[in-house]
Each structure stands twice: as C-alpha cells, then as structure tokens.
Amino acid sequence: MIILITGTPGVGKTTVSSILVEKIDAYLVNINELVDEKHLYNGIDEERGYKIVDLDALFNEMDEIIREVDGPDRYVVVEGHLSHLFENSDIVIVLRANPDVLRDRMKIKGWKAAKIRENIEAEAIDVCSYEAFQIHGDKVNEIDTSDIPPVQVADLIIDVINGDKSFPVGNVDFLEYLK
C-alpha cells in the first residue's frame, strides 16, 4: 500500500511520517532526502532559496524504490510537499495547518519572510489539496494539524488506512484568513 503524505512546508509531514512508519512498520521515502541524495534537481531558485526539482527523474526514482520494497503486506510512506504530484498511490494524506500556526512554526525554523508569506498563502488557498484531488480524487484526505499532537495525527492516518475514518477534501478551510 502506497501512502502519500503531503502539505505545505511546516505542517508536520516529516514528524508525523516518522511516527507513522514506526507504528505501521512501513518503508519511508523522504522526498527531500531523495532529491538531495540522488541530485534530482536542475538548479536553485536563488530568490526563494529552494531546489528546482526534476519531477520526471524524481518520479522514476520513486517508481524504482517502490518496486523494490512494495508488497501485498507492505506499507510505503512517501513524505514531502511534492509527493501528491506522484500518480501512484492508494491513499493521499494532505496535512494542513492554520496559517497563523504555520507562520509561528516557520519563524521558529528561521525561514525568510517572503518564503513564509508564500507558504501561508498557499495554505490558505489550499494548493496541495487542490492539486492532490485533481490527480488522486477520492483517495485524498485532509487532516488539520493545528491543535493535534503528531502522535494523534499518525493515529488518525492509521484510521484512514484501516477504513475506519475519512477526512474528505474540503473539511479544512482557511480561506477566511485571506480577508
């Protein structure tokens, strides 16, 4: 089973994914680490300070990894803000966070004001969920991490995996933040 965990930077993807893989004994693919390790980028956006990822190369590498580790009783968790663009999935989880909470998290990490503003706007207009839904449809679930500890978020994802709960796209809404 392939589980994609995506969301705007700062929503808790890495923390939640590391807890989740321990709880369900899954293989973890961290997209940022994979991009760095295999040099799957075409350059650096100097203004924004991030790598320009070669998506075709990334997805080819992910396909290869999944072929090696996937099996009928095996979970593969793919974590990263680009993971929802990968078409191969069984479940997609979009982690969300209130833009004010997100701003605080990014400030703590020392992010630049322009990057914080860009990511807060992306979160408010729901970019990751929209893109994920366009590719994966009803496989997509949204979970608001604003006030929930990462362990509890991982437990909610397990409930989705087991078919006990669903959190359809549209259940989290931060559009009022733009007013």
Image: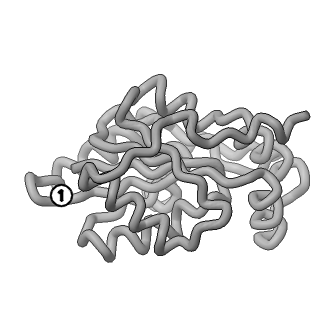
Image x and y of residue 3, in percent: 33, 50
Q: Is residue 165 visible?
A: yes
Which residue shows up at 44% across the image and 60% down it?
30
Which of the 4 image quadrants contains residue 104?
A: bottom right
Left or right placement of residue 69 versus residue 174 in this view: left
Which residue shows up at 37% across the image and 39% down it?
59
Which residue shows up at 42% across the image and 66% down it?
154
User: Which quarter of the figure is the C terminus placed in?
Assistant: top right
| Residue 9 sits above or below residue 138 on the image | below
Count of numbered badges drawn on the protein: 1
Label 1 sits on what residue type?
A: Val
Residue 71 vs residue 138, the one in the foreground: 138
| Residue 170 sits above or below residue 116 on the image | above
Left or right placement of residue 156 versus residue 48 in this view: left
Image x and y of residue 109, in percent: 76, 70
Q: Which residue is mark 1?
A: 69
Left or right placement of residue 13 versus residue 38 in this view: right
Q: Is residue 40 visible?
A: no
Image x and y of residue 39, in percent: 49, 52
